[in-house]
Amino acid sequence: MNDSEIRTGKKSLRYVIISGGGTGGHLFPAIAIANAIAAQHPTAHVLFVGARGRMEMEKVPEAGYRIIGLPVRGFDRKQPLKNFKVLWLLVKSLFIALKIVRRIRPDVVIGVGGYASAPVLYAAEMCHIPTIIQEQNSYAGVTNRILAKRVNKICVAYEGMEKYFPAGKIVVTGNPVRSNFMESIMRHQTMVFFDFAHDRPTILVLGGSLGARTINRSVLASLDTLPENINLIWQTGSEYEERSHQAVYDKKLQDRVKVFRFINRMELAFAAADLVISRAGASTISELCIIGKPCILVPSPNVAEDHQTKNAQMLAKKNAAIMIPDSKATEKLMPTAITVVQNPEMLEPLSENIRKLARFNAAQTIANIATTLGLGRN
């Protein structure tokens, strides 16, 4: 199978499995890859395999794809005795994954990280199905490092991943982003959408889908000091939505502070923002690179192997982002944001430097790799 045959569509992928999820950082790139495969192979079936009770069980069907849930869970680092059940569920999930793979016989299986990736990729390897890992972070997790010995290709977002993976398997693709982030959006559209009375410098705060405690508390504590010439778009997550709405109402800030539990039109929020405050998840960082948005990153201290700090440090070293440790956010986050958003001399180099890190067409590149591997078996 050569490239010209693939491009002219003489053959097409029949079935693809994408496994993983658990967080938006895993799930949104997975859906972007699925969309790219569907665009290249309109007759192909894309099946997701996720973890029961996790966000993918809701979001994947909303995106138009079928999903099967496994009973797999993450290990409990605080209560090790509970891990006996976790191990049993892992074994059970492997047998379910084997049954799925043997029944469907997919052309290729792609793991994007999350609890379900490991059993599905192991099952595919046992059935001699080509496999791909998509590693979003600049620091590879333990599971992917173990799986790397078995998979065919490893798609990474950053250079220098040879320290974690076999060099011959690595392809630097960047992280896939949601396709609507590439759209051109006029500034006045965003002002209308968010119902701002005036077009002022705007800060976008991403407090997480569940609620990043430190970021949300930092904003709450600083509402009284927010200058009148600044707009604020604030995604609080579920835990902080009610108290944030109440605080904005009590301080009569509704005309310039807009509170959301979750922002469905994130492309409009990014277009409106002059500065973004966020955790340092790889998926969000990739989106910020694509659109060239200045940002302040507050790495979560509660993620495996502290990979968010490593992501943020990589950008901060290139003056492509400002990093504020979680432990100092209450004191420094909002004062820094207020200073930066009003200072074009600080915003412009941050924007220029983060845009240099962008890798476009990541989803299409990964779909091409999946096509080459999958059709190579036919």
Image: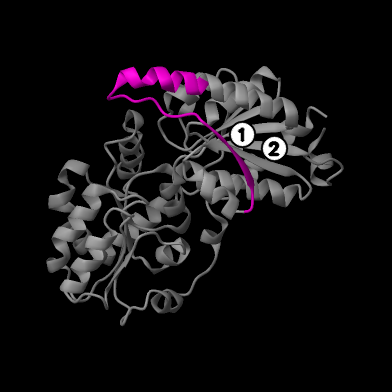
The residue to which callout 1 is attached is 110
Q: Earlier in the sequence, mark 2 or mark 1?
A: 2
The residue to which callout 2 is attached is 16
Judge left or right: residue 205 versus residue 104: left
User: Decide: marks 2, 1 in contact (CB < 8 A)?
Assistant: yes
What span is colored magenta in the figure?
Answer: 64-90
Amino acid found under the numbered disc labelled 1:
Ile
Q: Residues within 10 Å of mark 1 (few under 14, many from 20)?
A: many
Q: Is residue 321 above or below residue 293?
A: above
Look at the image and tell me whether residue 151 can be seen: no
Quarter of the image for the C terminus: give it. top right
Amino acid found under the numbered disc labelled 2:
Val
Cα–Cα span, label 2 and label 1? 8 Å
Q: Residues within 10 Å of mark 2 (few under 14, many from 20)?
A: many
Q: In the rendering, at what x and y percent does residue 54 appear? A: 46, 41
182 or 263: nearer the viewer: 263
